[in-house]
Image: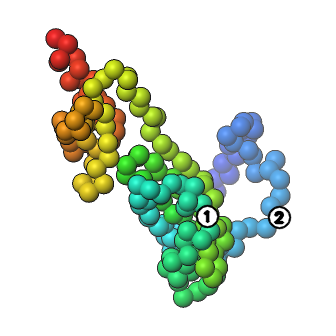
Amino acid sequence: MPKTAPAAPPPAREATPTFMPVAAAAPLKQKLLEKNFGVASFKFNRWSAVLEEDQALEDALEPAFWASHVGKILGHDTMQGRGDIIEIRKLDSGLYAELLVVEAGAGFIRVEVVHRHEPKPIELPANVPFTTRWNAGKRLHEVIRKADGAVMAGNFQTRGSAARWIAEHMKALAA
């Protein structure tokens, strides 16, 4: 078989913000060790906590708040827990937050907020004869008449949906 000439190398690309030629890159100090790389769910846990109506996110930031859950987070290996994420939900207000466990020990878990979302507050005009309230038993919002406290509508998952019902009802009354 006849020998063929080696293929010419591809033309060199210029460095751009998304492409850095290997020769131009800074030399690596040390590569990532194999033991330090893996599927996140095998190395860290995500926990979920629902705050009650009388609890606030500020309560969850206190290390003693988690005292009864240290055993779950630490597990059998007392080195576990640090780096875990705790998802916080508050059903009455719609709050969602993610807390990073930065330290865990006997009787405490220290956390920091890494993400927080709260729906925008809804203000109802003062002259509207209705308001909303959280029904703790049903864990849903209701619309009540201010004059006598009668429930006008219920089973709203968010305060915003209850406020929209009030707005639509007021338009219907005005028509």
- Is there CB contact under 8 Å for labels 1 and 2? no
Give me the residue at 55% from left, 59% from top.
59
Q: Label 1 vs label 2: CA separation?
A: 39 Å
Residue 62 badge: 1
Give the residue type that dot 2 points to.
Lys
Determine which residue is flagged by label 2: 29
Q: Nearer the viewer, mark 1 or mark 2?
A: 1
Q: Residue furthest bottom?
A: 76
The answer to whether residue 44 is visible is no
Residue 160 badge: none
Q: Residue furthest top?
A: 175
Quarter of the image for residue 17 reads top right
Tell me which numbered mark, 1 or 2, is placed earlier along the sequence.
Answer: 2
Residue neighbourhood size for the residue with mark 1, other residues' Cα within 10 Å, grouped as few (<14), some (14–19), many (≥20)? some
What x and y, as percent, mark residue 142?
25, 41
Q: Tell me the quarter of the image containing the N terminus.
A: bottom right
The local secondary structure at tag 1 comes to loop
Give me the residue at 75% from left, 38% from top.
15
Quarter of the image for residue 164 reads top left
Give the residue type that dot 1 points to.
Glu
In the rendered image of this protein, does residue 32 appear above or below residue 74? above
In the rendered image of this protein, does residue 114 appear above or below residue 124? below
The local secondary structure at tag 2 comes to loop
What x and y, as percent, mark residue 43?
55, 73
Residue sitting nearer the eye, 51 or 30: 51
Q: Tell me the quarter of the image containing the C terminus.
A: top left
Side (left or right) of 150 relative to 131: left
Residue sitting nearer the eye, 8 or 155: 155
Give me the residue at 31% from left, 37% from top.
132
